[in-house]
Amino acid sequence: MRHWNILGAAVLALALSSVAAGAQTVKIGIVNTYSGPAAEPGDLIQRGIDLYMKEHEKDLPPGVKVELIKRDDTGPNPEVAKRLATELITRDKVNFLAGFVYTPNAMAVGPLATEAKVPVVVMNAGTAAITTTSPYIARVSFTMWQSSYPLGQWAAKNNIKKVYSAVSDYGPGIDAEAAFTKGFTDNGGQMLGSVHMPFNTADFVPYMQKAKDTNPDAVYVFVPAGKQAIALMKAFGEVGLKQAGVKLIGPGDITTDEGLDDMGDVALGTITMFHYSAAGKRPANDAFVKAYKAAYGQKEEPAFEVVGGYDGMDAIYHAIIAQKGKLDPDKTMALLKEWKSDKSPRGPVSIDPETRDVVQTEYLRRVEKVNGKLYNVEIDSMPAVKDPWKIINNKK
Ligand code: PHB
């Protein structure tokens, strides 16, 4: 009898402790691009997630564990993203969905998030309308309008009179072109023409040749960060636009910090507007760059995608810690809406509670050589920029 009591108590204690532990495992479903030709930004996001978790595991309340369930969408494939998100919601019962490099994938999960009440943290995709597709989406990355609208204003006021635009033919490219064009032409600039390039373009020479033929002061470009940005920069050099004195301008996706070495000197002088540069001189960024190099190699430079993953986890940890690991989706959304950080590598950043979209400093940068290496050197900044598309169009 006595024997049974002890055994019974032990079994009960074990059962209770595993229930308690189980109840405090927070599951995050990561929908990200881990394979295929467009995987580079996805790998960088994952590096940011991993670095954050390693540094901040100690900040979780006692007994709370975070489990990542990683799924590969293999590129901009909304049907795949939808299927993966559905499985993560219904089978794995995740508390969050996060990741999302590519706009079509983020767009595809909005209705699912609303129906299942699963908070989504967008760590990259930049088309302005994404956050309007569900009240359960918050974005920590950027919008194309946030960089390209002020870049258009800057160009018109800085002796650039005629511009030809070449953008990737999908959500963020269409947004980027519209944003630049509005900022530029509202301030007296003239657009000479534009071309929308298919997402999978490998050879940008014909497009850059077309741009050159219009004799512009500058070519405005958006292509997704990664291999495409490197190929575009090479084409800009090959057709002789640089030698002809034509400037290359765009959002920072076209001069990614991790890609500058591969782009080479043709990138020198490129002007971009963006929210993050590895060369940013801030104590939080110094520490971040140091930790990144220690984790991934001294020759590596962290890029904006890494920061998207890193800060995205900070927003998620904020919601987890405030609720001590027992998550309610509506409380989580309220906590995401009040997230702000003065420890981000990019400078002060927050989420606008009205739109659930990111508010951050935009930096004007020029590619320069520092100690023999190419960097996006910050030359000016605009604090607390909200998504201009939502302001202009009165969108929430
Ligand atoms: C997007 O699909 O929204 C996207 C992808 C890569 C970028 C920027 C935006 O560099």
Image (cartoon, rainbow, N blue to C red):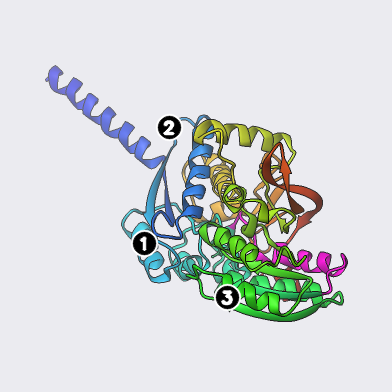
Residue at 69% of width from left, 53% of height from top?
Answer: 275
Quadrant location of the N terminus?
top left
Q: Amino acid at mark 1?
A: Leu
Magenta residues span 139-161
Residue denoted by label 2: 63
Residue denoted by label 3: 206
* Tag count: 3
Q: Is residue 320 shown above or below 101? A: above
Q: Residues within 10 Å of mark 1 (few under 14, many from 20)?
A: some
Q: CA distance from mark 1 to mark 2?
A: 28 Å
Q: Nearer the viewer, mark 1 or mark 2?
A: 1
Q: Nearer the viewer, mark 1 or mark 3?
A: 3
Instruction: Decide if ligand 1 comes within 8 Å of the CB at mark 2.
Output: no
Q: Amino acid at mark 2?
A: Gly
Residue 84's disc number: 1
Quadrant location of the C terminus?
bottom right
In the image: residue 74, left or right of residue 376: left
Q: Residue furthest top?
A: 2
In the image: residue 325, left or right of residue 165: left
In the image: residue 344, left or right of residue 11: right
Residue at 57% of width from left, 75% of height from top?
Answer: 206
Give coordinates of residue 18: x percent, y percent: 31, 34
Circle 1: element type: helix
Give coordinates of residue 297: x percent, y percent: 52, 34
Q: CA distance from mark 1 to mark 3?
A: 37 Å
Q: Residues within 10 Å of mark 3 (few under 14, many from 20)?
A: few
